[in-house]
Amino acid sequence: MTAKDLFEIAEAYEQRGKLDMARRSYARIVHLHPEEVVAYHKLAVLALREGDHAQALAFIDKGLSIDRNAVGLWNNRGLALTELGRADEASESLGIALSLRPDNVPALYNLGRLQIGEGKFAEAEHTLRRACELDPHSADAFLNLGLALHQLYRYDEACEAYDKALAIQPNSVDVLSNKGASQYFAHRLDQAEATFRGVIAQSPGYAAAHANLASVLFSKGDLAGGFRENEWRFRTPGWKPLRSFTRKEQWGGEPLRGETLLVHAEQGLGDSLQFVRYITELAKMDCEIVVDIQPDLYRLCSGAMKFANVRWSRSEALPGSDLQIPLLSVPAVLGFTYETLPPFKPYLAPREAEAAVWRGKLNRMTGIAWGREVKRRKQRRIGLVWSGNPSNPKDRTRSMTFDVLAPIVEAHKDDTIFFSLQKGQKANHPNVIDLGDELTDFGVTAAIVENLDLVISVDTSTAHLAGAMGKQVWTLLSHTPDWRWVLGEQKTKWYPAMSLFWQKQPGTWDNVIAEVIEALSLQE
């Protein structure tokens, strides 16, 4: 049987959806006719469709050993390597494909997606604009162009790209959901809400649209609506719980009569610090409570929040429980709104002895004699945090480098003693005392914060800690920060002693730094 005959059989199987039979037929071709590059390419495409990227790469490399000028193989090699996390090799392969055929739209598209994944957003814009010019009917190219423009903070242009994609694929829920995100980041909240509700009406189970709608509602101050939609977070792609355990029935707010309720942390340290306050409300109920908290928070929380019916766990083996609830679902079940939040009382505090030890340490660091009254000091003590966890998806927009924050230190180095509470990065400034290496857990951080006059922090866990302690804290927020902050508010109902400083333009902290410098001057 000739190669042509075998190709006709294989392609017929493929058209009928009988992919196993098609694969066997293509495999037979390369066995009988090992020079047939197209058969290797077909096998690679089938492997890519099934997510077997390593196998696809093997077929592609075999084909390229026969024909080094096969543009399609180089393109798919780049795609396979991208999925395998080998970005540099993927970029090289796609570059070869484009050197062979500069107008190859699939290679341009795949290179643009790769550049987005690598954070090379300006390069991605250039690549994807070229793809859109060559193929103005590619909805995927316009969609990814929109993604690149969004990351460049050009939200209106991103929406224009999404509209072009929608003109090709009307009512695409993926495109609409991304358009809603750009409207949200442009602070067009009513439009974003309408877009996400439209997606949900069209596709009620689209979890990402529900989760994004939650962010919009939170940003508008609709706490109840935000918490309701936020329950969809567990169904969003890529959701990973902090811990895996046998899931019990989730508590829905029904009266408790002696049951054991497992309350478990589910997201970041800042989330736990903010919402652990609700353990106080749960402890009033007729139940036994086990709180599973991150190890870094265990010593602080278990020491500060002691209740007869509450046991704290730091992720060791858990006792049996009748019901469970994620920590961020508790306020939704309790039905709180901003109007009905319980009056704030500081709910976290360091151990007194530990705070006293750090009082002495800070005094010695700053040349103040042991026992001297704080009120007699002429210099303020301010803690600084300029960067969060780099693994956070929003870290690029919420964090800064110390160099960006440094003008605050320079402007007030004569009247303020600055302490770095930043882990993993050094200030390297003569007027900043670095305490980052001392922060072994949040019990230590709380003891230090207790002895400071003010904390200035980006939107990270230390800001939440200071807020929970009732300490004065100035939180520096990106143009569109995390969901918990109501857009435009300078004070927050979560923490009465916290003040909010917002970026006026996406991606630049200039106005925030200037406002902090001025506010510190007014305090003198």
Image (cartoon, rainbow, N blue to C red):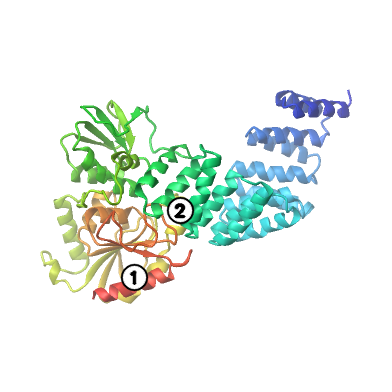
Q: Say whether residue 338 is visible.
A: yes
**Which residue corresponds to the image point at 24% horizontal and 41% vertical from the top-left?**
279
Element class at badge 1:
helix
Looking at this view, is 509 or 145 the one in front?
145
Q: Which residue is mark 1?
A: 516
Q: Say whether residue 111 is visible.
A: no
Q: Quadrant of the N terminus?
A: top right
Q: Amino acid at mark 2?
A: Lys
**Which residue corresponds to the image point at 36% horizontal and 72% vertical from the top-left?**
515
Left or right of 299 on screen, residue 87: right
Place residue 369 in its image quadrant: bottom left
How many residues crowd around disc 2 within 10 Å: few (fewer than 14), some, or many (20 or more)?
Answer: some
Please determine whether, in this image, residue 405 is positioned above or below residue 115: below
Looking at this view, is 287 or 408 the one in front?
287
Q: Position of residue 90 (x, y in %)?
A: 65, 47
**Which residue corresponds to the image point at 34% horizontal and 42% vertical from the top-left?**
328
Place residue 511 in its image quadrant: bottom left
Instruction: Give the CA separation, mark 1 to mark 2.
Output: 23 Å
Please determine whether, in this image, residue 219 is positioned above or below residue 298: below
How many residues crowd around disc 1 within 10 Å: few (fewer than 14), some, or many (20 or more)?
Answer: some
Left or right of 42 on screen, residue 323: left
Which of the two labelled residues, at mark 1 and mark 2, occupies the earlier sequence position? 2
Q: Position of residue 267 (x, y in %)?
A: 38, 43
Q: Which residue is mark 2?
A: 394
